[in-house]
Amino acid sequence: MQQSSTDLAEIFEEWLGDPENSSNSLSFAGALELDERDELPAAGIDQVRAFGFNRYFVPERLGGDLRAAEDILMLTRVIARRDMNVAVSESTQVWMMLAWIGGDAEQQEKYAATVLRGGVVPCLAYSEPGHGADLAANRFTAAPDAGQYVLTGEKWPINRGRTSTHVVLLGITGDEDTPAKRQQSMFLVDRSEVISGQVTGVPRVPTYGLRGCDISGVAFEGARVEASARLGAEGEGLELALRGLLITRTFCTGLSLGTGDTMLRTVAEFLSDRVLYDGPADEIPYVTESLANAYLSLLVAECESLVAMRGLHLYTEQFSIWGNLAKVQVARLVDFNSKVLARTLGARYFLRAAEHVGTFQKMLRDGAVVSVFDGSEPVCLDSIALQLPALAKAHGHDPDEDWRPLYDLRADLPPFEPDRVSVFGRGRDATFASLPALTDRLAALSPSAGCDGQRLAVLRERAAELRDELDALLARVQEVRRWAAAQPPTRPSASAKSTPPRLIRVAEELSNLHAKVAALGVWLFNRDHLGGFFAEGEWLQAALDRRQVHQYDAGDLDPSTAARLFDRMNAQRADNEFFSVRPVRMAAPGSSEAGPERGSAAA
Protein backbone atom coordinates (compact mmCIF):
# COMPACT_ATOMS: atom_id res chain seq x y z
CA MET A 1 0.00 0.00 0.00
CA GLN A 2 1.38 3.40 -1.02
CA GLN A 3 2.17 5.94 1.65
CA SER A 4 -0.45 8.69 1.78
CA SER A 5 0.39 12.39 1.73
CA THR A 6 -0.90 12.73 5.30
CA ASP A 7 1.37 9.89 6.42
CA LEU A 8 4.29 11.63 4.74
CA ALA A 9 3.43 14.91 6.47
CA GLU A 10 3.35 13.18 9.86
CA ILE A 11 6.73 11.55 9.22
CA PHE A 12 8.18 14.92 8.24
CA GLU A 13 6.64 16.52 11.33
CA GLU A 14 8.39 13.93 13.49
CA TRP A 15 11.65 14.54 11.63
CA LEU A 16 11.56 18.28 12.29
CA GLY A 17 10.29 18.03 15.87
CA ASP A 18 8.12 20.44 17.82
CA PRO A 19 8.75 24.07 16.74
CA GLU A 20 8.03 25.13 20.32
CA ASN A 21 11.23 23.28 21.31
CA SER A 22 13.85 26.01 20.96
CA SER A 23 16.68 23.48 20.52
CA ASN A 24 15.26 22.31 17.16
CA SER A 25 16.66 23.74 13.94
CA LEU A 26 13.20 24.87 12.85
CA SER A 27 11.90 26.38 16.07
CA PHE A 28 9.75 29.47 16.42
CA ALA A 29 12.26 31.07 18.79
CA GLY A 30 15.19 30.38 16.48
CA ALA A 31 13.29 31.64 13.46
CA LEU A 32 12.58 34.92 15.21
CA GLU A 33 16.20 35.39 16.26
CA LEU A 34 17.50 34.77 12.75
CA ASP A 35 14.81 37.00 11.28
CA GLU A 36 15.89 39.87 13.51
CA ARG A 37 19.43 39.46 12.13
CA ASP A 38 18.27 39.09 8.50
CA GLU A 39 20.13 35.78 8.50
CA LEU A 40 19.57 32.79 6.23
CA PRO A 41 18.33 29.86 8.39
CA ALA A 42 21.12 27.48 7.37
CA ALA A 43 20.54 24.87 10.09
CA GLY A 44 16.85 24.62 9.26
CA ILE A 45 17.64 24.25 5.57
CA ASP A 46 20.14 21.49 6.37
CA GLN A 47 17.53 19.62 8.43
CA VAL A 48 15.02 19.81 5.58
CA ARG A 49 17.63 18.60 3.10
CA ALA A 50 18.61 15.72 5.37
CA PHE A 51 15.02 14.50 5.15
CA GLY A 52 15.36 14.25 1.38
CA PHE A 53 13.00 17.11 0.53
CA ASN A 54 14.70 17.52 -2.86
CA ARG A 55 13.66 14.01 -3.90
CA TYR A 56 9.99 14.95 -3.98
CA PHE A 57 10.61 17.27 -6.95
CA VAL A 58 12.02 14.50 -9.17
CA PRO A 59 9.53 12.11 -10.86
CA GLU A 60 9.60 8.46 -9.91
CA ARG A 61 10.38 7.55 -13.53
CA LEU A 62 13.66 9.46 -13.10
CA GLY A 63 14.52 7.89 -9.73
CA GLY A 64 12.90 10.46 -7.43
CA ASP A 65 9.91 10.39 -5.09
CA LEU A 66 7.55 12.74 -6.96
CA ARG A 67 4.42 10.60 -6.92
CA ALA A 68 1.63 12.93 -5.91
CA ALA A 69 1.30 16.69 -6.18
CA GLU A 70 -0.30 16.60 -2.74
CA ASP A 71 2.98 15.32 -1.30
CA ILE A 72 4.63 18.62 -2.24
CA LEU A 73 1.66 20.54 -0.84
CA MET A 74 1.86 18.78 2.52
CA LEU A 75 5.66 18.91 2.84
CA THR A 76 5.61 22.62 2.03
CA ARG A 77 2.84 23.15 4.56
CA VAL A 78 4.87 21.40 7.27
CA ILE A 79 7.89 23.67 6.69
CA ALA A 80 5.92 26.90 6.21
CA ARG A 81 4.11 26.56 9.51
CA ARG A 82 7.52 26.71 11.20
CA ASP A 83 9.52 29.22 9.17
CA MET A 84 8.69 30.71 5.77
CA ASN A 85 12.34 31.67 5.33
CA VAL A 86 13.20 27.97 5.15
CA ALA A 87 10.14 27.07 3.10
CA VAL A 88 10.75 29.76 0.49
CA SER A 89 14.52 29.15 0.38
CA GLU A 90 14.18 25.42 -0.23
CA SER A 91 11.01 25.37 -2.32
CA THR A 92 13.13 26.76 -5.18
CA GLN A 93 13.74 23.05 -5.85
CA VAL A 94 10.49 23.23 -7.78
CA TRP A 95 12.19 25.19 -10.56
CA MET A 96 14.14 22.10 -11.61
CA MET A 97 10.71 20.86 -12.68
CA LEU A 98 11.11 22.99 -15.80
CA ALA A 99 13.53 20.32 -17.01
CA TRP A 100 10.69 17.78 -16.82
CA ILE A 101 8.46 20.21 -18.75
CA GLY A 102 10.80 21.42 -21.49
CA GLY A 103 13.91 19.25 -21.42
CA ASP A 104 14.74 16.32 -23.68
CA ALA A 105 15.39 12.82 -22.33
CA GLU A 106 19.13 13.43 -21.93
CA GLN A 107 18.62 16.70 -20.06
CA GLN A 108 16.03 15.14 -17.78
CA GLU A 109 18.33 12.28 -16.85
CA LYS A 110 21.20 14.68 -16.19
CA TYR A 111 19.27 17.13 -14.04
CA ALA A 112 17.44 14.39 -12.15
CA ALA A 113 20.76 12.84 -11.15
CA THR A 114 22.07 16.28 -10.15
CA VAL A 115 19.08 17.02 -7.91
CA LEU A 116 19.12 13.56 -6.35
CA ARG A 117 22.78 13.94 -5.38
CA GLY A 118 21.70 16.93 -3.26
CA GLY A 119 23.16 20.36 -2.78
CA VAL A 120 21.32 21.93 -5.70
CA VAL A 121 20.04 25.47 -5.04
CA PRO A 122 18.04 26.60 -8.07
CA CYS A 123 16.73 30.10 -8.59
CA LEU A 124 14.19 31.48 -11.02
CA ALA A 125 15.69 34.40 -12.90
CA TYR A 126 12.87 35.89 -14.95
CA SER A 127 12.42 39.36 -13.45
CA GLU A 128 14.58 42.28 -14.53
CA PRO A 129 14.90 45.61 -12.67
CA GLY A 130 13.07 47.67 -15.26
CA HIS A 131 10.33 45.29 -16.30
CA GLY A 132 8.91 43.40 -13.30
CA ALA A 133 6.13 41.02 -14.36
CA ASP A 134 6.30 42.17 -18.01
CA LEU A 135 8.52 39.30 -19.11
CA ALA A 136 8.04 40.09 -22.79
CA ALA A 137 9.93 43.36 -22.21
CA ASN A 138 13.07 41.64 -20.88
CA ARG A 139 16.45 42.72 -22.28
CA PHE A 140 18.74 39.94 -21.03
CA THR A 141 20.49 38.48 -24.07
CA ALA A 142 21.53 34.92 -24.93
CA ALA A 143 23.48 35.35 -28.14
CA PRO A 144 24.08 32.17 -30.18
CA ASP A 145 27.75 31.75 -31.00
CA ALA A 146 29.49 28.73 -32.54
CA GLY A 147 27.07 26.19 -31.10
CA GLN A 148 27.08 27.87 -27.68
CA TYR A 149 25.35 30.88 -26.07
CA VAL A 150 26.80 34.01 -24.53
CA LEU A 151 24.64 35.34 -21.68
CA THR A 152 24.63 39.00 -20.72
CA GLY A 153 22.37 40.95 -18.39
CA GLU A 154 20.99 41.18 -14.87
CA LYS A 155 18.07 39.47 -13.18
CA TRP A 156 16.56 41.09 -10.07
CA PRO A 157 14.83 40.79 -7.62
CA ILE A 158 14.82 37.02 -7.30
CA ASN A 159 14.95 34.47 -4.53
CA ARG A 160 18.34 32.80 -4.07
CA GLY A 161 19.99 34.97 -6.69
CA ARG A 162 23.38 35.15 -4.97
CA THR A 163 23.39 31.71 -3.33
CA SER A 164 22.06 29.62 -6.22
CA THR A 165 23.97 26.78 -7.88
CA HIS A 166 21.61 26.63 -10.88
CA VAL A 167 19.81 29.49 -12.62
CA VAL A 168 16.63 29.11 -14.68
CA LEU A 169 16.47 32.19 -16.88
CA LEU A 170 14.95 33.77 -19.97
CA GLY A 171 17.26 35.31 -22.57
CA ILE A 172 16.70 36.91 -25.96
CA THR A 173 17.85 34.62 -28.76
CA GLY A 174 15.82 36.17 -31.59
CA ASP A 175 16.44 39.30 -33.63
CA GLU A 176 14.33 42.32 -34.54
CA ASP A 177 12.45 40.29 -37.16
CA THR A 178 11.39 37.67 -34.61
CA PRO A 179 7.86 38.05 -33.18
CA ALA A 180 8.02 39.41 -29.61
CA LYS A 181 6.53 36.27 -28.08
CA ARG A 182 9.18 34.11 -29.76
CA GLN A 183 12.25 36.20 -29.02
CA GLN A 184 13.22 34.58 -25.71
CA SER A 185 14.50 31.12 -24.90
CA MET A 186 14.81 29.32 -21.58
CA PHE A 187 18.09 28.20 -20.07
CA LEU A 188 18.96 26.09 -17.05
CA VAL A 189 22.49 27.15 -16.21
CA ASP A 190 24.71 25.17 -13.88
CA ARG A 191 26.99 27.92 -12.61
CA SER A 192 29.84 25.43 -12.21
CA GLU A 193 29.67 24.65 -15.95
CA VAL A 194 29.96 28.23 -17.26
CA ILE A 195 32.81 28.08 -19.78
CA SER A 196 33.99 31.69 -19.61
CA GLY A 197 32.83 35.15 -18.63
CA GLN A 198 31.44 36.08 -15.24
CA VAL A 199 28.38 35.23 -13.14
CA THR A 200 28.10 37.35 -9.98
CA GLY A 201 25.54 37.91 -7.27
CA VAL A 202 23.64 41.17 -6.97
CA PRO A 203 23.41 42.34 -3.32
CA ARG A 204 20.41 41.49 -1.18
CA VAL A 205 17.65 44.02 -0.67
CA PRO A 206 15.82 44.68 2.62
CA THR A 207 12.31 43.24 2.57
CA TYR A 208 9.12 43.64 4.59
CA GLY A 209 8.92 39.91 5.28
CA LEU A 210 11.18 36.93 4.54
CA ARG A 211 13.98 38.87 6.16
CA GLY A 212 16.18 35.78 6.31
CA CYS A 213 15.80 34.93 2.62
CA ASP A 214 18.33 35.69 -0.08
CA ILE A 215 16.17 38.12 -2.05
CA SER A 216 18.81 39.44 -4.39
CA GLY A 217 19.84 39.04 -8.00
CA VAL A 218 22.34 37.54 -10.41
CA ALA A 219 24.34 39.20 -13.19
CA PHE A 220 25.90 37.58 -16.26
CA GLU A 221 28.69 39.27 -18.18
CA GLY A 222 29.66 37.46 -21.37
CA ALA A 223 29.00 34.11 -19.67
CA ARG A 224 29.42 31.36 -22.24
CA VAL A 225 27.43 28.14 -21.85
CA GLU A 226 26.91 25.03 -23.95
CA ALA A 227 23.81 24.80 -26.12
CA SER A 228 22.66 21.91 -23.94
CA ALA A 229 21.83 24.50 -21.24
CA ARG A 230 18.82 25.57 -23.32
CA LEU A 231 15.49 23.94 -22.44
CA GLY A 232 13.09 23.48 -25.33
CA ALA A 233 13.41 25.08 -28.72
CA GLU A 234 14.70 28.56 -29.44
CA GLY A 235 11.88 31.06 -28.98
CA GLU A 236 9.91 28.77 -26.67
CA GLY A 237 11.06 30.48 -23.47
CA LEU A 238 7.96 32.53 -22.61
CA GLU A 239 5.66 29.59 -23.21
CA LEU A 240 7.76 27.32 -20.97
CA ALA A 241 7.92 30.03 -18.33
CA LEU A 242 4.14 30.35 -18.21
CA ARG A 243 3.66 26.57 -18.09
CA GLY A 244 6.00 26.32 -15.13
CA LEU A 245 4.34 29.19 -13.30
CA LEU A 246 0.93 27.52 -13.56
CA ILE A 247 2.29 24.61 -11.54
CA THR A 248 4.20 26.66 -8.99
CA ARG A 249 1.27 29.04 -8.43
CA THR A 250 -0.78 26.01 -7.46
CA PHE A 251 1.90 24.79 -5.05
CA CYS A 252 2.00 28.25 -3.44
CA THR A 253 -1.20 27.29 -1.64
CA GLY A 254 0.86 25.10 0.71
CA LEU A 255 2.76 28.15 1.90
CA SER A 256 -0.50 29.95 2.68
CA LEU A 257 -1.92 26.95 4.54
CA GLY A 258 1.22 26.66 6.67
CA THR A 259 1.37 30.30 7.70
CA GLY A 260 -2.41 30.42 8.15
CA ASP A 261 -2.31 27.49 10.56
CA THR A 262 0.40 29.03 12.74
CA MET A 263 -1.23 32.46 12.84
CA LEU A 264 -4.54 31.02 14.02
CA ARG A 265 -2.90 28.57 16.44
CA THR A 266 -0.70 31.27 17.97
CA VAL A 267 -3.57 33.68 18.52
CA ALA A 268 -5.92 30.96 19.82
CA GLU A 269 -3.36 29.72 22.34
CA PHE A 270 -2.51 33.21 23.56
CA LEU A 271 -6.14 34.23 24.01
CA SER A 272 -7.11 30.98 25.72
CA ASP A 273 -4.52 31.75 28.41
CA ARG A 274 -5.25 35.46 28.55
CA VAL A 275 -7.60 36.53 31.35
CA LEU A 276 -9.73 39.59 30.58
CA TYR A 277 -12.96 40.76 32.21
CA ASP A 278 -12.79 37.95 34.79
CA GLY A 279 -12.49 35.12 32.27
CA PRO A 280 -10.51 33.65 29.35
CA ALA A 281 -10.27 36.15 26.50
CA ASP A 282 -11.38 33.58 23.95
CA GLU A 283 -14.78 33.33 25.69
CA ILE A 284 -15.61 36.91 24.72
CA PRO A 285 -18.27 36.39 22.01
CA TYR A 286 -16.52 38.63 19.47
CA VAL A 287 -13.24 36.74 19.98
CA THR A 288 -14.94 33.35 19.79
CA GLU A 289 -16.62 34.22 16.51
CA SER A 290 -13.45 35.72 15.03
CA LEU A 291 -11.47 32.55 15.77
CA ALA A 292 -14.32 30.36 14.48
CA ASN A 293 -14.48 32.31 11.23
CA ALA A 294 -10.71 32.12 10.76
CA TYR A 295 -10.86 28.36 11.29
CA LEU A 296 -13.65 28.06 8.71
CA SER A 297 -11.58 29.99 6.17
CA LEU A 298 -8.68 27.57 6.62
CA LEU A 299 -10.99 24.62 5.94
CA VAL A 300 -12.19 26.22 2.70
CA ALA A 301 -8.62 27.08 1.70
CA GLU A 302 -7.59 23.50 2.28
CA CYS A 303 -10.46 22.16 0.16
CA GLU A 304 -9.46 24.45 -2.72
CA SER A 305 -5.82 23.36 -2.38
CA LEU A 306 -6.53 19.63 -2.20
CA VAL A 307 -8.84 19.69 -5.21
CA ALA A 308 -6.24 21.66 -7.17
CA MET A 309 -3.56 19.07 -6.34
CA ARG A 310 -5.82 16.28 -7.58
CA GLY A 311 -6.64 18.33 -10.66
CA LEU A 312 -2.94 18.54 -11.51
CA HIS A 313 -3.07 14.76 -12.05
CA LEU A 314 -6.47 14.47 -13.69
CA TYR A 315 -6.94 17.69 -15.68
CA THR A 316 -3.39 18.96 -16.14
CA GLU A 317 -4.15 20.78 -19.39
CA GLN A 318 -6.72 23.01 -17.64
CA PHE A 319 -4.40 24.81 -15.26
CA SER A 320 -4.03 27.97 -17.32
CA ILE A 321 -7.16 29.10 -15.46
CA TRP A 322 -7.21 26.75 -12.48
CA GLY A 323 -3.72 27.45 -11.12
CA ASN A 324 -4.45 31.18 -11.06
CA LEU A 325 -7.84 30.70 -9.38
CA ALA A 326 -6.36 28.53 -6.64
CA LYS A 327 -3.45 30.84 -5.88
CA VAL A 328 -5.61 33.96 -5.72
CA GLN A 329 -8.35 32.53 -3.55
CA VAL A 330 -6.25 30.58 -1.04
CA ALA A 331 -3.99 33.60 -0.49
CA ARG A 332 -7.06 35.81 -0.04
CA LEU A 333 -8.57 33.46 2.54
CA VAL A 334 -5.39 33.45 4.62
CA ASP A 335 -4.56 37.14 4.14
CA PHE A 336 -8.02 38.24 5.28
CA ASN A 337 -7.65 35.94 8.29
CA SER A 338 -4.36 37.60 9.17
CA LYS A 339 -6.00 41.03 9.35
CA VAL A 340 -8.86 39.79 11.52
CA LEU A 341 -6.53 37.84 13.81
CA ALA A 342 -4.24 40.87 14.19
CA ARG A 343 -7.23 42.98 15.21
CA THR A 344 -8.40 40.26 17.61
CA LEU A 345 -4.95 39.88 19.15
CA GLY A 346 -4.81 43.61 19.79
CA ALA A 347 -1.68 45.55 20.73
CA ARG A 348 0.40 42.37 21.10
CA TYR A 349 0.33 41.87 17.34
CA PHE A 350 2.42 45.02 16.98
CA LEU A 351 5.27 43.73 19.20
CA ARG A 352 8.00 41.63 17.61
CA ALA A 353 9.61 39.82 20.56
CA ALA A 354 8.83 36.16 21.18
CA GLU A 355 7.29 36.81 24.59
CA HIS A 356 4.78 39.11 22.90
CA VAL A 357 3.56 36.56 20.34
CA GLY A 358 6.19 37.69 17.83
CA THR A 359 5.67 34.49 15.86
CA PHE A 360 2.28 35.77 14.73
CA GLN A 361 3.72 39.01 13.42
CA LYS A 362 6.50 37.20 11.58
CA MET A 363 4.02 34.84 9.93
CA LEU A 364 1.81 37.78 8.96
CA ARG A 365 4.75 39.53 7.26
CA ASP A 366 6.15 36.41 5.65
CA GLY A 367 2.83 35.00 4.46
CA ALA A 368 1.95 38.24 2.68
CA VAL A 369 4.50 37.38 -0.01
CA VAL A 370 2.35 34.57 -1.44
CA SER A 371 0.01 37.02 -3.14
CA VAL A 372 3.06 38.74 -4.66
CA PHE A 373 5.43 36.13 -6.06
CA ASP A 374 5.12 33.63 -8.95
CA GLY A 375 2.71 36.15 -10.42
CA SER A 376 1.09 38.76 -8.21
CA GLU A 377 -2.66 38.74 -7.60
CA PRO A 378 -3.31 41.35 -10.35
CA VAL A 379 -1.20 39.31 -12.80
CA CYS A 380 -3.11 36.12 -11.96
CA LEU A 381 -6.48 37.85 -12.21
CA ASP A 382 -5.52 39.38 -15.55
CA SER A 383 -4.56 35.93 -16.83
CA ILE A 384 -7.97 34.58 -15.78
CA ALA A 385 -9.76 37.56 -17.32
CA LEU A 386 -8.08 37.05 -20.70
CA GLN A 387 -9.40 33.48 -20.79
CA LEU A 388 -12.95 34.28 -19.70
CA PRO A 389 -14.37 34.39 -23.27
CA ALA A 390 -13.17 30.83 -23.83
CA LEU A 391 -14.54 29.74 -20.44
CA ALA A 392 -17.90 31.34 -21.22
CA LYS A 393 -18.02 29.70 -24.65
CA ALA A 394 -17.27 26.24 -23.26
CA HIS A 395 -19.68 26.58 -20.34
CA GLY A 396 -22.54 24.10 -20.50
CA HIS A 397 -20.86 21.87 -23.07
CA ASP A 398 -18.89 19.66 -20.68
CA PRO A 399 -19.23 15.88 -21.01
CA ASP A 400 -20.59 13.79 -18.15
CA GLU A 401 -17.79 12.42 -16.01
CA ASP A 402 -17.17 10.47 -12.85
CA TRP A 403 -16.08 13.23 -10.50
CA ARG A 404 -15.10 10.94 -7.64
CA PRO A 405 -11.36 10.91 -8.46
CA LEU A 406 -11.30 14.72 -8.30
CA TYR A 407 -12.97 15.00 -4.90
CA ASP A 408 -12.64 11.69 -3.03
CA LEU A 409 -9.42 12.05 -1.04
CA ARG A 410 -9.06 8.24 -0.98
CA ALA A 411 -9.30 7.75 -4.76
CA ASP A 412 -6.21 6.68 -6.69
CA LEU A 413 -4.72 9.10 -9.19
CA PRO A 414 -2.69 8.66 -12.38
CA PRO A 415 0.94 9.82 -12.30
CA PHE A 416 1.58 13.55 -12.18
CA GLU A 417 2.96 14.60 -15.58
CA PRO A 418 3.99 18.26 -15.46
CA ASP A 419 4.87 18.31 -19.16
CA ARG A 420 1.15 18.14 -19.97
CA VAL A 421 0.48 21.64 -18.61
CA SER A 422 -0.71 23.98 -21.34
CA VAL A 423 -0.72 27.79 -21.48
CA PHE A 424 -4.27 27.75 -22.86
CA GLY A 425 -6.85 25.37 -21.40
CA ARG A 426 -9.49 26.15 -24.06
CA GLY A 427 -11.97 27.37 -21.49
CA ARG A 428 -12.15 24.15 -19.53
CA ASP A 429 -12.31 23.97 -15.74
CA ALA A 430 -13.29 20.67 -14.16
CA THR A 431 -14.37 22.21 -10.87
CA PHE A 432 -16.99 24.40 -12.54
CA ALA A 433 -17.90 21.58 -14.95
CA SER A 434 -18.64 19.28 -12.01
CA LEU A 435 -21.17 21.62 -10.40
CA PRO A 436 -24.31 20.18 -12.08
CA ALA A 437 -23.29 16.67 -11.01
CA LEU A 438 -22.57 17.89 -7.48
CA THR A 439 -26.02 19.45 -7.19
CA ASP A 440 -27.58 16.19 -8.43
CA ARG A 441 -25.61 14.21 -5.86
CA LEU A 442 -26.69 16.63 -3.14
CA ALA A 443 -30.33 16.27 -4.22
CA ALA A 444 -30.09 12.49 -3.80
CA LEU A 445 -28.75 12.62 -0.22
CA SER A 446 -30.99 11.39 2.58
CA PRO A 447 -31.18 13.17 5.95
CA SER A 448 -29.00 11.77 8.72
CA ALA A 449 -28.64 12.28 12.45
CA GLY A 450 -26.02 15.00 12.03
CA CYS A 451 -27.33 16.48 8.79
CA ASP A 452 -31.10 16.72 8.96
CA GLY A 453 -33.59 17.62 6.28
CA GLN A 454 -33.52 21.30 7.14
CA ARG A 455 -29.76 21.58 6.65
CA LEU A 456 -29.92 19.55 3.43
CA ALA A 457 -32.60 21.89 2.13
CA VAL A 458 -30.40 24.91 2.84
CA LEU A 459 -27.36 23.27 1.22
CA ARG A 460 -29.40 22.42 -1.87
CA GLU A 461 -30.58 26.01 -2.05
CA ARG A 462 -27.00 27.28 -1.76
CA ALA A 463 -25.78 24.86 -4.44
CA ALA A 464 -28.55 26.04 -6.79
CA GLU A 465 -27.46 29.61 -6.11
CA LEU A 466 -23.89 28.67 -7.06
CA ARG A 467 -25.12 27.37 -10.42
CA ASP A 468 -27.16 30.49 -11.04
CA GLU A 469 -24.29 32.74 -10.05
CA LEU A 470 -21.85 30.90 -12.32
CA ASP A 471 -24.27 31.16 -15.25
CA ALA A 472 -24.79 34.87 -14.60
CA LEU A 473 -21.08 35.60 -14.24
CA LEU A 474 -20.15 33.92 -17.49
CA ALA A 475 -23.05 35.63 -19.25
CA ARG A 476 -21.58 38.95 -18.07
CA VAL A 477 -18.32 38.27 -19.90
CA GLN A 478 -19.64 39.19 -23.34
CA GLU A 479 -21.63 42.10 -21.90
CA VAL A 480 -18.48 43.54 -20.31
CA ARG A 481 -16.48 43.08 -23.51
CA ARG A 482 -19.15 44.81 -25.60
CA TRP A 483 -19.41 47.61 -23.05
CA ALA A 484 -15.62 48.09 -23.00
CA ALA A 485 -15.42 48.15 -26.80
CA ALA A 486 -18.09 50.86 -26.93
CA GLN A 487 -16.34 53.18 -24.46
CA PRO A 488 -14.58 56.18 -25.98
CA PRO A 489 -10.93 56.48 -24.88
CA THR A 490 -10.65 58.69 -21.82
CA ARG A 491 -7.04 59.57 -22.51
CA PRO A 492 -4.21 58.38 -24.77
CA SER A 493 -2.39 55.29 -23.54
CA ALA A 494 0.71 53.54 -24.79
CA SER A 495 0.15 50.51 -22.58
CA ALA A 496 -0.37 47.15 -24.27
CA LYS A 497 -2.30 45.99 -21.19
CA SER A 498 -5.92 46.96 -21.71
CA THR A 499 -7.97 44.41 -19.75
CA PRO A 500 -11.16 46.15 -18.52
CA PRO A 501 -11.33 46.33 -14.71
CA ARG A 502 -14.89 45.03 -14.91
CA LEU A 503 -13.53 41.85 -16.46
CA ILE A 504 -11.00 41.59 -13.63
CA ARG A 505 -13.98 41.85 -11.26
CA VAL A 506 -15.59 38.84 -12.96
CA ALA A 507 -12.32 36.94 -12.49
CA GLU A 508 -12.36 37.82 -8.79
CA GLU A 509 -15.91 36.59 -8.35
CA LEU A 510 -15.10 33.38 -10.22
CA SER A 511 -12.23 32.65 -7.84
CA ASN A 512 -14.69 33.03 -4.97
CA LEU A 513 -17.12 30.57 -6.61
CA HIS A 514 -14.32 28.14 -7.39
CA ALA A 515 -13.43 27.70 -3.72
CA LYS A 516 -17.07 27.21 -2.75
CA VAL A 517 -17.58 24.50 -5.39
CA ALA A 518 -14.37 22.78 -4.28
CA ALA A 519 -15.58 22.74 -0.66
CA LEU A 520 -18.95 21.32 -1.74
CA GLY A 521 -17.27 18.57 -3.75
CA VAL A 522 -14.90 17.57 -0.96
CA TRP A 523 -17.82 17.39 1.48
CA LEU A 524 -20.03 15.30 -0.81
CA PHE A 525 -17.40 12.69 -1.60
CA ASN A 526 -15.74 12.34 1.83
CA ARG A 527 -18.51 12.71 4.41
CA ASP A 528 -19.03 8.93 4.60
CA HIS A 529 -15.52 8.30 5.97
CA LEU A 530 -14.51 11.58 7.64
CA GLY A 531 -17.75 11.61 9.64
CA GLY A 532 -18.66 13.67 12.69
CA PHE A 533 -18.11 17.41 12.48
CA PHE A 534 -17.12 17.26 8.83
CA ALA A 535 -20.05 15.12 7.66
CA GLU A 536 -22.69 17.17 9.44
CA GLY A 537 -22.02 20.01 7.01
CA GLU A 538 -22.61 22.93 9.36
CA TRP A 539 -19.20 24.30 8.41
CA LEU A 540 -20.04 23.97 4.71
CA GLN A 541 -23.33 25.82 5.13
CA ALA A 542 -21.51 28.64 6.93
CA ALA A 543 -18.96 28.85 4.10
CA LEU A 544 -21.61 28.91 1.37
CA ASP A 545 -23.54 31.56 3.29
CA ARG A 546 -20.66 34.02 2.85
CA ARG A 547 -21.08 36.39 -0.07
CA GLN A 548 -17.32 36.47 -0.63
CA VAL A 549 -15.95 33.29 0.85
CA HIS A 550 -12.75 34.90 2.15
CA GLN A 551 -14.53 37.79 3.90
CA TYR A 552 -16.58 37.84 7.09
CA ASP A 553 -17.84 40.39 9.57
CA ALA A 554 -18.76 40.34 13.24
CA GLY A 555 -22.22 38.90 13.68
CA ASP A 556 -22.24 36.91 10.44
CA LEU A 557 -22.19 33.52 12.16
CA ASP A 558 -25.07 32.03 14.04
CA PRO A 559 -23.87 31.78 17.69
CA SER A 560 -24.39 28.00 17.76
CA THR A 561 -22.39 27.59 14.54
CA ALA A 562 -19.62 29.80 15.91
CA ALA A 563 -19.51 27.65 19.04
CA ARG A 564 -19.30 24.43 17.00
CA LEU A 565 -16.49 25.76 14.83
CA PHE A 566 -14.66 27.15 17.85
CA ASP A 567 -14.95 23.84 19.70
CA ARG A 568 -13.72 21.89 16.67
CA MET A 569 -10.75 24.22 16.29
CA ASN A 570 -9.87 23.80 19.96
CA ALA A 571 -10.27 20.02 19.74
CA GLN A 572 -7.76 19.84 16.89
CA ARG A 573 -5.46 22.18 18.79
CA ALA A 574 -5.69 20.01 21.92
CA ASP A 575 -5.15 16.83 19.88
CA ASN A 576 -2.06 18.40 18.29
CA GLU A 577 -3.50 18.16 14.78
CA PHE A 578 -3.40 20.44 11.77
CA PHE A 579 -6.42 22.68 11.36
CA SER A 580 -7.85 20.46 8.68
CA VAL A 581 -10.89 18.61 7.35
CA ARG A 582 -9.05 15.36 8.18
CA PRO A 583 -6.81 14.27 11.04
CA VAL A 584 -3.12 15.04 10.45
CA ARG A 585 -0.86 14.77 13.51
CA MET A 586 1.78 17.35 14.27
CA ALA A 587 5.08 16.65 15.99
CA ALA A 588 4.58 15.60 19.60
CA PRO A 589 4.76 18.47 22.11
CA GLY A 590 8.34 19.02 23.22
CA SER A 591 9.74 16.50 20.74
CA SER A 592 13.26 16.90 19.39
CA GLU A 593 14.21 16.77 15.74
CA ALA A 594 15.74 13.67 14.19
CA GLY A 595 19.51 13.49 14.54
CA PRO A 596 22.09 12.61 11.90
CA GLU A 597 22.27 9.05 13.20
CA ARG A 598 18.89 8.36 11.57
CA GLY A 599 20.11 9.21 8.08
CA SER A 600 17.87 10.44 5.31
CA ALA A 601 14.17 9.80 5.80
CA ALA A 602 13.77 9.39 2.05
CA ALA A 603 16.47 6.75 1.78
Image (cartoon, rainbow, N blue to C red):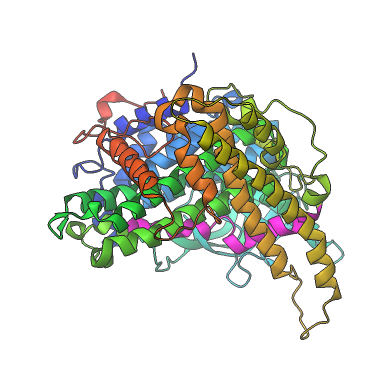
Residue 22, relative to residue 339: is it above or below?
Answer: above
Is 541 magenta? The answer is no
491 in relation to 460, above or below: below
Q: Residue furthest front?
A: 454
Measuring from the top left, give residue 62's x and y in whole percent.
Answer: 59, 26
> Which quadrant of the view contains residue 308?
top right
Tell me the residue at 20%/57% (across/down): 354
User: Outermost residue, bottom direction?
Assistant: 491
> Could you tell whether 198 is left or right of 51 in the image?
right
Going by the image, does 17 lie left or right of 55?
A: left
Main SS, magenta region, reads helix
What residue appears at the point 33 percent right and 50 percent down from the top-left corner?
Answer: 264
Residue 107 visible within the image: no
Front residue of 27/234: it is 27
Q: State the quadrant of the C terminus.
A: top left
Number of numbered discs overlaid on the protein picture: 0
Residue drawn 31% across the image and 34% down it: 586
Point 53% across, 50% down: residue: 545
- Residue at the far top: name it: 1
Where is 427 relative to 551, above or below? above
Q: In the image shown, does 385 or 143 lie closer to the viewer?
A: 385
What range is drawn magenta here?
A: 362-389
| Residue 25 at least partly seen | yes
173 lies above or below 128 = above
Percent across and percent down for residue 589 are: 21, 35
Q: Is residue 178 left or right of residue 255?
A: right
Q: Position of residue 431 (x, y in %)?
A: 66, 39
Could you say where residue 525 lies in the image, as x and y percent from the top left? 57, 27
